[in-house]
Each structure stands twice: as C-alpha cells, then as structure tokens.
C-alpha cells in the first residue's frame, strides 16, 4: 500500500448567489478557505450575497486552497444599472395618506 503525502485536489463549488454564511460553510465542507477582498469584516458578514468568485466553479485545486469571493460588483460589471425616474411619480402623503381615520370621511365632528 502506497500512501501519498500529496494533498488531494477538490473541485471548487459554485458560491455565486449564496449568502456569505452559506458560502463559508460550503467552502469549509470542501476543505477550502474563503476570503473576500472587498469585505475586511468578512467573518461578520451573514446575509450579503456572493456576486463573483475565483477560481471559478468546477476548477480543481489542492485542499486548503484559498477561494476569493466578492459581494459588490466592480466598475463596469453590472449591478443596479441606470435608475430613471418613475413616471408617473407615486402620490405624496406616505403613511398618513394610507392610514386615514376610520369612519365616514364626510361626517363633521361636533364639539361638546
């Protein structure tokens, strides 16, 4: 029996679309390390979604390799797109308009 000291290769999972907490767990389960160059506080990130990764999904890398993930699109990579004004504009009034007093709106209240 021959025992190899070479680290076995693993396939990089698809992390794009996963929340930070799920991406970390998925990478850890495959024996990979995860880092996020655009998030210094990556270990605290939970609900941010991965938008890009390197190496790409399916790549074979040695166990304990670093996988890089990004949560923000870089310049020219997409994102929110152009935001044009909505026509017609929503009515003014906010919550006050939505939460009218109950009862007949035409009834005049008499004072005591």
Image (cartoon, rainbow, N blue to C red):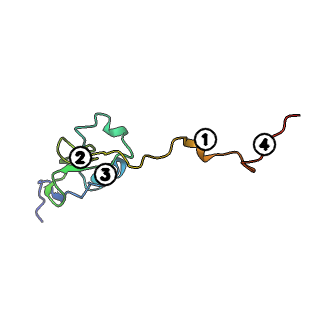
Disc 3 or disc 1, which is closer to the eye?
Answer: 1
Quote the CA–CA distance across marks 2 and 4: 63 Å
Residue 58 in the image: above or below residue 51:
below
Residue 75: quadrant of the picture: top left
The residue tagged 1 is 96
Label 2: few (<14), some (14–19) or many (≥20) C-alpha neighbours in 10 Å:
many
Cα separation, mark 2 vs mark 1, equals 44 Å
Helix, strand or loop under label 1? helix
- The residue to which callout 3 is attached is 23
Which label sits on residue 108? 4
Q: Which residue is mark 2?
A: 69
Viewer-nearest of discs 1 and 4: 4
Foreground label between 4 and 3: 4
- Residue reaching furthest to the right: 112
Badge 3 marks a residue whose secondary structure is: helix
* Quadrant of the rendered image containing residue 84: top left
Instruction: Tell which circle, 3 or 1, labels the residue nearer the N-terminal end.
Output: 3
CB of mark 3 within 8 Å of CB of mark 1? Answer: no
CB of mark 3 within 8 Å of CB of mark 2? Answer: yes
Q: Position of residue 95 (x, y in %)?
A: 58, 42
Q: Is residue 8 left or right of residue 16?
A: left
Q: Nearer the viewer, residue 62 or 74?
A: 74
Tell me the residue at 32%/54% (across/down): 18
State which tag comes first along the sequence, 1 or 4: 1
């Amino acid at each position: 029996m021959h025992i190899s000291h070479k680290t076995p290769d693993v396939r990089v999972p698809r992390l794009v679309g996963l929340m930070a907490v799920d991406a970390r767990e998925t990478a850890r389960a495959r024996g990979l390390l995860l880092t996020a160059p655009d998030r210094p506080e990556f270990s605290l990130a939970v609900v941010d979604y991965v938008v890009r990764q390197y190496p790409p999904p399916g790549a074979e890398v040695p166990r304990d390799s670093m996988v890089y993930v990004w949560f923000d699109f870089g310049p020219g990579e997409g994102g929110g797109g152009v935001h044009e004004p909505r026509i017609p504009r929503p009515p003014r009034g906010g919550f006050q308009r939505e939460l009218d007093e109950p009862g007949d709106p035409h009834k005049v209240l008499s004072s005591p």
